[in-house]
Image (cartoon, rainbow, N blue to C red):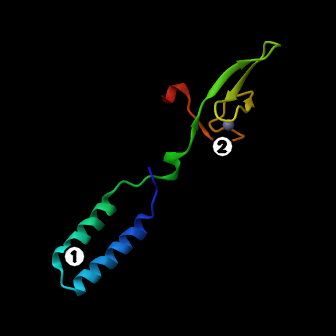
Amino acid sequence: MRLIDADGLVHRLSGCAIKSRKLEDWDRVQFWHKAMAEVKSSPTIEPDMIRPIAYWILGQKEDGTYYLSCSHCQYEADKYYDFCPQCGYEISHPKDD
Ligand SMILES: [Zn+2]
């Protein structure tokens, strides 16, 4: 997946349509308008939707106490967090899977 500036692309396609209109190339005008419609109707992906995901790994120290370790950065936490305090990855809880 590659994120692009959809509004910028529509602006560029609009410029192409205007040039084609000046040349009275109506097939191309129609083509550019269809392309703009496709871009405009494409789903928007919010930055939160691509936030990296990690999960807690339950560990036990030599003294018998338990801890949680971030699967991404191995940060050790003493309680559940929704986001890793060190790397910021969103934590996927088993109930979310
Ligand atoms: Zn982490």
- The amino acid type of the residue labelled 1 equals Val
Task: Give the image location of residue 14, x and y in percent.
Answer: 32, 76
User: Mark 1 — residue?
Assistant: 29
Q: Residues within 10 Å of mark 2 (few under 14, many from 20)?
A: some
Residue under label 2: 88
Instruction: Decide: few, some or many residues near mark 1? Use Cα within 10 Å; few <14, some 14-19, many ≥20.
Output: many
Reply above or below: 83 against 39.
Answer: above
Q: Is residue 95 left or right of residue 41?
A: right
Residue at 31% of width from left, 59% of height from top? 41
Q: Residue furthest right?
A: 63
Name the spot of residue 20 as percent of width and height, x first. 24, 81
The answer for how far apart the CA atoms under marks 2 and 1 are is: 46 Å
Secondary element at image label 1: helix
Residue 32 at x, y percent in the picture:
26, 71
Name the residue at 23% across, 83% down.
21
Residue 90 horizontal side relative to residue 50, left or right:
right
Is residue 64 shown left or right of residue 53?
A: right
Above or below for 4 versus 76: below
Secondary structure of the residue carrying numbered label 2:
loop
Sequence-wise, which precedes: disc 2 or disc 1?
1
Mark 2–mark 1 contact, CB under 8 Å? no
Of circles 2 and 1, which is in front?
A: 1
